[in-house]
Amino acid sequence: MFLERIDKPTMVAKLNNEELAQLAAEVRQRIIDVVAKTVATSRPVWGTVDLTLALLSVFDPIKDRVVWDVGHQSYAWKILTERNARFSTLRQYGGISGFTNRDESPYDAFSTGHSSTSISAALGIAAARDLRRESFHSIAVIGDGALTGGMSFEALNHSGHLQPDKFIVILNDNAMSISKNVGGLQKYMARMYASKSYNALKKQVWDLSSSLPSSVRRRFIYGAQKLEESMMNILVPNIIFEDLGFKYVGPIDGHDIPHLISILKRVKNFMVGPVLIHVVTQKGKGYSPAEEDASGFHGVGPFDNESGKTACSGKLSYSDVFGQSLCELAGKHKEIVAITAAMSAGTGLSSFEKMYPERLFDVGIAEQHAVTLAAGMATKGIKPFVAIYSSFMQRALDQVIHDVAMPKLPVVFCIDRAGLVGEDGATHQGTFDISFLQFIPNLVILAPSCAEELQAMLVWAASYYDGPVAIRYPRGTAICRNIKLWISRPE
Ligand SMILES: Cc1ncc(C[n+]2csc(CCOP(=O)(O)OP(=O)(O)O)c2C)c(N)n1
């Protein structure tokens, strides 16, 4: 067992390719063994194991700063940065967090949980480094799902302005958010996989540059990059990241560790200005049940690690009650639509999505946009039900106040996971919504005490047009009094 011998992350850099491959397999197995038993949800994190090993082979995990977006893909990072012994306490009371956390380890550069913060944070770290005249690399690792969040674009835009050296964004592209990723950017990235001629050209330029003496290398690279830009415009029109001021490198196979290492070394040693490395990975890679059902494996309870099967609780959650009731209501009220910010399954909207695909709007991880999209629809007689978890609703406070409540638009906010949520930890507790909603003018706030009340509130809200309504309900099994339930319990 290699893993047992890795008590310092710097040891990873000393391994050869075969040893790295074995270590990757052991880390994957360690994750499977722990998350299968975890008394909580678990995450499909096997896809970033190879990237983690490559990062640890090239960068210094204390001096250089790696910011993992959301943080749920950092399990391999945790295992290899002195937390293997504690890894079995993952997502348990007093145990280690399911996300990166500065209080937990000096290897965690930034505390995370909510999406799309990594580029801003890594840029801030790079800016602070330059002000303090220090020298190290600042690296953001962001998924294609998290890239759909507006903050990511704000940060990319600002990076193009600041142009820091030693600043790398690694785009971990598995074409999946929790469900399949949505949007024009995803389609655009899929087109880039085809850009073979551009990549071949880039490789030749780099191969040549690494053989030059350091005195001329920098000038050569600058000239080559200029040439490359003009060639690129012919071969791959409109590389969006280059237009924003990044050097684009990719797409690269995120499971080929030696290749990843060689790319990271080249970027580390030769590239100037912000660099975006586009890495293509497979969600769940290395654990076949998760490879086959990647979205099903995001946020499951304990499972059998051979078959990957989870036990069905047979109980109805508040999210189920919401989703099924909304299906019924949408049959009667043709103007009802549902809006989700990349969380259709989590918020109970899967049946709605199947029954009314044209009336379900998945906006990506973009809560602010979800709320103002609803506001726009409401001005034209549509009745939007916006389903967002309580803690993610924090993002969209100004949109609720300014775009919905002040103009008294009839939007219904279905605030799931209100109150304590358990194992997801501090960043996901829905403990602030009453405080931040109660001062908002024109907003009716409702909190059901059982499934039947939730249904009654949804029925009332569907016909209420004097202003917005927020209905907050908790995670987990709904209390059912069986008074007038239209919906059936799952098998
Ligand atoms: C603001 C916010 N909204 C929603 C979520 C819930 N969430 C956690 S992970 C995730 C999908 C992230 O997809 P991606 O960035 O592609 O990472 P992957 O899981 O594919 O590695 C979502 C929507 C969140 N963490 N933060």
Image (cartoon, rainbow, N blue to C red):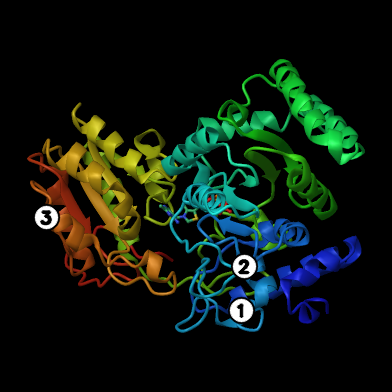
Residue located at (52% from left, 37% from top): 162
Disc 1 residue type (three-letter): Phe
Q: Is the C-beta of the residue carrying label 1 under 8 Å from the nearest atom of ligand 1?
A: no
Q: Is residue 284 above or below residue 365?
A: below
Q: Secondary structure at mark 1?
A: helix
CA separation in Å, label 1 and label 2 = 8 Å
Crowdedness of circle 1 by 10 Å Cα count: few (<14), some, many (20+)? many
Q: Which residue is mark 1?
A: 87
* Residue 349: x %, y % from top left: 38, 50
Q: Which residue is mark 2?
A: 75
Q: Is residue 251 left or right of residue 72?
A: right
Instruction: Give the image quarter of residue 430.
Output: bottom left
CA separation in Å, label 1 and label 3 = 42 Å
Residue located at (52% from left, 46% from top): 145
Q: Is residue 384 above or below residue 56?
A: above
- In front of the other: 123 or 148: 123
CA separation in Å, label 3 and label 2 = 39 Å
Q: Which residue is mark 3?
A: 439
